[in-house]
Image (cartoon, rainbow, N blue to C red):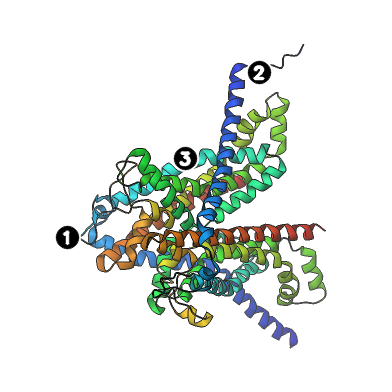
Amino acid sequence: MLNNQLSAKRTHYLVLMKALMALSVIFMIMLVLFLVGYVLIKGIPFVTPEFLSSGVSYLNERIGILPNILNTVYIILATLMMVLPLGVGAAVYLNEYASNKKLVNSIEYAADILAGIPSIIYGLVGMLLFSNHMGACLLAGALTLVIMNLPVILRTTQESLKTVPQSYRDGAYALGAGKWRVIRTVVLPGCVDGVITGCILATGRIMGESAALLFTAGFAHALNGFLQGLQSAGATLTVALYLYAKVEGEFDVAFAIAAVLMLLTVLVNFCAAFVGKYYKRRNSL
Amino acid sequence: MIKGKKDFSERIIHGGFLLLGLLTVSCVLTITVYLIISGIPAIKEIGLVNFLFGTEWSSTAANAKFGILPFLLTSIYGTAGAIILGVPIGFFAAVYLSKLAPPKVRAVMENAVSLLAGIPSVIYGLVGMIVLVPKIRELFKLPDGASLLAAIFVLSIMILPSIIKISMTALDAVPKEYEDASLALGATPIETYFRVSVVAARSGIATAVVLGVGRAIGEAMAVMMVCGSAPNMPDSLFQSVHFLTTIVGSEMAYSSGLQRQALFSIALVLFMFIMLINAVLKFFLQENKEV
């Protein structure tokens, strides 16, 4: 007979490890369920159509978050418009032009450093670089976020540029195309998925950002159009949440904003997963 | 003739892309230079030793004192606490998800972890403020629950996603042969995962921990909402404290003169911590490549 019994010591070890893994995973599940559930239950009752579609009026004692929603949209649009050409261009340079290994390494290392700098430091630097010259406004906030999101766009674009087959480029060259023509007609269309993924990730980061915007974009809740909005101070949803919770003690409003943000975060995550899956399936065909 | 013209425009385009490529480097240089230029004056005026090891911060008093030792220690203790609580949970969850979980469970949990990573830090702060802080006050019978302990709890949860994700990537990359060999020698699957796979993935897991340190030390908003915001020395977990990030965040808006300069010096100190973490990260990543 083969003895399949493990020694007592080994059995204890197995039980202990299994228990620790089970506890950790259960903790994670409970944590996510609790966070999402709690925020939605506390916040959703206060999310009325009026709350979403009006501004702040002290006369009517009404708090609405339309200005904050618009500010968030403006700052996302402005940031993406600036960071996309820069990030994609940098990625194209790294992948298509750069031949000096040292230069590539230092550019990538710089991108890693940028990705690791805490947002509060971006806030300070943004204040020094932009807000001190143009005043606290959405544009100053957007410029700060451009630096912050540069590594995101750079990395995702770079990843998808690597998946464009070399034979496509060679084919275009063989037909007599110049380098720029190859990039424009073959390489760039091939990295659309990376750019889209980068945009979604950047949107999520911008939406959730607060520390970098406190000193750069200001606190106002005024309702503005796009161009006017960029030139004036404004609080995005996250900054508004912070102000209502910490400064004004309006916790119902804070939770309502939190619920809206939570739903948007779920939406962004869903989009990112969907796009990832869609392009994976298409690329494998 | 035509060829020469084309060469010229190609060269201009090449130059344009080179400039874009150098953008990240110039951003890093600009940030570094600006932080050093604005951080040095206050350190000079206060004195490096007084600044780093002074235990008292009273920036608005008549006889203002700018010692940042309380914030330095709080940031170090807070980060260490978050790592002690967060890393084991993240580590065991990552081993389970990478090695044992059924594909469906894994897919669901990966989405959950991404969601956790995407939740804005102010929401963590808000929930901490409303749920955690009162609980701590009741449990330990304190006058106020906003404390170092509350900040540690919030931070430990906020670093979980990066720890789990990066550890999982490292564990997934362990060659199957290693595990097969261990199984063939009679080790049970769980013994194999913990004594072979984890060891093989150790530098990746170390990277995850270092990234967690970076996130914890740099987090401002969530901590600002639960730490109590008083410049005390962190002699106990229940002390109301300020971190390096939170003192900058809460005093910058109304600061002026030497106080403002001192806040920039704090940012410089924080930046140096981050650069140190980056250097450690680069070291681990290089080791990863060599293995």
- Name the side, left or right, on which A180 lies relative to A244: right
- Badge 1 is on which residue? B63
Residues at discs 3 and 1 both on one chain:
yes
Mark linked to residue B85 = 3
Q: For residue B149, say whether it is visible.
A: yes
- Name the side, left or right, on which B199 lies relative to B45: right
Q: For residue B41, say whether it is visible.
A: no
Residue farthest toward the left in the current orientation of the protein: B63
Residue A81 x, y percent position in the rendering: 58, 75
Q: Is B194 in front, or is A207? A: A207
| Residues at marks 1 and 2, CA–CA distance in whole angstroms | 71 Å
Q: Label 1: state its secondary structure.
A: loop
Q: Is A110 in front, or is B188? A: B188
Residues at discs 2 and 3 both on one chain:
no
Q: Quadrant of residue A211?
A: bottom left
Mark linked to residue A6 = 2
Q: Quadrant of residue B103?
A: top right
**Sooner in the amino-acid sequence: mark 3 or mark 1:** 1
| Residues at marks 3 and 1, CA–CA distance in whole angstroms | 40 Å
Q: Amino acid at mark 1?
A: Asn
| Chain of the residue under label 2 | A
Looking at the image, residue A70 lies above or below residue A267: below
Q: Amino acid at mark 2?
A: Leu
Please state which of the two labelled residues, at mark 3 or mark 1, is closer to the viewer: 3
Q: Residue at x 48, y 76 (%)?
A: A139
- Name the side, left or right, on which A31 lies relative to A198: left
| Chain of the residue under label 1 | B
Q: Classify mark 1: residues with Cα within 10 Å, few (<14), some (14-19) or many (20+).
A: few
Q: Classify mark 3: residues with Cα within 10 Å, few (<14), some (14-19) or many (20+).
A: some
